[in-house]
């Protein structure tokens, strides 16, 4: 299939996706105008820090589990709950195709009431009876939990919340999961009653869902910002190669979405084996350089000559052997 024909297909797919999203976007806009739309946003995304907002706390949970945690070694950062203004809705929705930023929350209650409720679930009990930080602001995680928790656990988790809006990275739509409580709510549940259990099968399903969404995020990043380099690949081919690039990126210590997306982009734009060049490899394997600084070091320290050499040594059989 030639590039012009492929571009036409992609445009048609985009039109279908936009059509599917209209209904959800209109409902979200209505909620925003009514003051009922909130978002749990990963702390990494400062550009979505609308006001009013409140960072969820780590303290309001089961007292016994709180004491079990070595807080001096905790690096987990809980999400920020923000009220989404109508003028800020498009900013969040436009980030669907390139980020895993968080989830929407629909409620008739105040931001303060919602934050007090939701921070009681930041810590859960794992299959080994130990505390686990629960990343329920990740749509891939919450989607699994809402489909596998008991009815009682789901009712406790919803409480004063009317619906959760989970970004679907396959369709670029918002899937609304409405509360099973209807107009009823549980506002003042004791912290120890909010300690929800996580089964090993749930954790495994969450891990798989996170990995699948990571591939989708990088897929859309490449389609949006590196279209020319990957225009000859269909979706299945591109996602298979992204999985390979993610595994290769992790071997150098990359963990964040942005770093893995950046490393993948270099494999597609420059050469899939660019990291075999001595200059690139020296920086990527430098144990004294933090992983989040390595891509910046590549742009700052690699000479034009080395970039050309890496391109000249493009291994055209690389993907075929993987």
Image: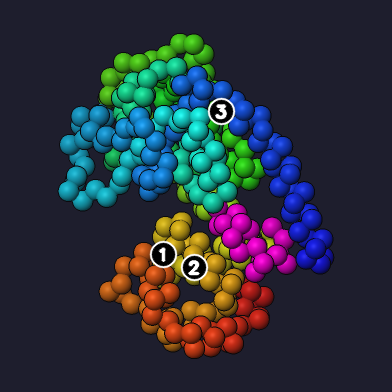
Instruction: Report the disc number at residue 28.
Output: 3
- Viewer-side label of 3, 1: 3
Task: Residue at 47% x, 22% y: name it.
Answer: 36
Q: Quadrant of residue 170?
A: top right
Label 2 secondary element: helix
Q: Give the spatial CA distance, label 2 vs label 1.
A: 8 Å
**Depicted 46 relative to depicted 34: above or below:** below
Does any portion of residue 314 appear in the rendered image?
Answer: yes
Q: Front-most of 16 and 188? A: 16
Q: Quadrant of the N terminus?
A: bottom right
Residue 194 visible somewhere in the drawing: no
Which x, y percent locates residue 88?
48, 35
Please tell me which residue is depicted at 82% across the width and 61% down the height of the picture. Answer: 5
Nearest to N terminus: mark 3 or mark 1? 3
- First in sequence: mark 3 vs mark 2: 3
Q: Is residue 204 left or right of residue 68?
A: right
Kindly indicate whether the residue at mark 1 contacts the one at mark 2 (C-beta within 8 angstroms). yes
Q: Would you place residue 268 above or below residue 224 in this image?
A: below
Q: Of the numbered discs in the image, which one, if any, rests on residue 254?
A: 1
Mark 2 lies on residue: 263
Residue at the (65%, 63%) spot, across then down:
227
In this view, 303 is above or below 185: below
| Main SS, magenta residues | helix
Q: Which stretch did the figure color magenta?
A: 217-235
Spot the residue most to the front.
87
For disc 3, the neighbor class at 10 Å (few under 14, some 14 to 19, many from 20) is: many
- Check if residue 229 falls in the magenta segment: yes
């Amino acid at each position: 299939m030639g590039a012009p024909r492929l571009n036409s297909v992609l445009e048609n797919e985009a039109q279908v996706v936009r059509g599917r999203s209209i209904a959800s976007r209109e409902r979200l806009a209505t909620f925003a105008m009514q003051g009922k739309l909130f978002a749990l946003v990963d702390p990494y995304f400062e550009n979505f820090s609308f006001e009013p907002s409140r960072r969820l706390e780590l303290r309001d949970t089961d007292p016994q589990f709180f004491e079990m945690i070595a807080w001096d070694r905790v690096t987990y950062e809980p999400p920020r709950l923000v009220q989404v203004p109508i003028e800020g809705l498009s900013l969040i929705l436009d980030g669907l195709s390139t980020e895993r930023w968080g989830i929407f929350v629909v409620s008739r209650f105040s931001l303060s009431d919602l934050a007090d409720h939701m921070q009681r679930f930041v810590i859960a009990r794992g299959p080994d009876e130990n505390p686990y930080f629960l990343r329920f602001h990740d749509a891939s995680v919450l989607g699994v939990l809402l489909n596998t928790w008991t009815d009682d656990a789901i009712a406790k988790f919803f409480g004063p919340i009317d619906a959760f809006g989970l970004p679907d990275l396959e369709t670029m739509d918002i899937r609304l999961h409405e509360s099973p409580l209807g107009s009823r709510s549980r506002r003042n549940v004791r912290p120890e009653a909010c300690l929800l259990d996580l089964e090993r099968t749930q954790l495994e399903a969450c891990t798989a869902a996170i990995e699948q969404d990571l591939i989708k995020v990088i897929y859309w990043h490449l389609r949006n910002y590196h279209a020319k380099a990957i225009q000859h690949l269909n979706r299945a081919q591109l996602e298979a190669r992204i999985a390979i690039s993610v595994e290769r990126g992790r071997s150098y210590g990359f963990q964040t979405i942005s770093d893995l997306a950046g490393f993948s982009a270099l494999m597609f734009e420059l050469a899939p084996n660019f990291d075999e060049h001595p200059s690139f490899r020296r920086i990527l394997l430098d144990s004294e350089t933090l992983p989040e600084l390595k891509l910046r070091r590549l742009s700052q320290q690699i000479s034009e000559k080395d970039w050309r050499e890496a391109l000249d040594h493009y291994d055209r059989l690389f993907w075929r052997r993987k």
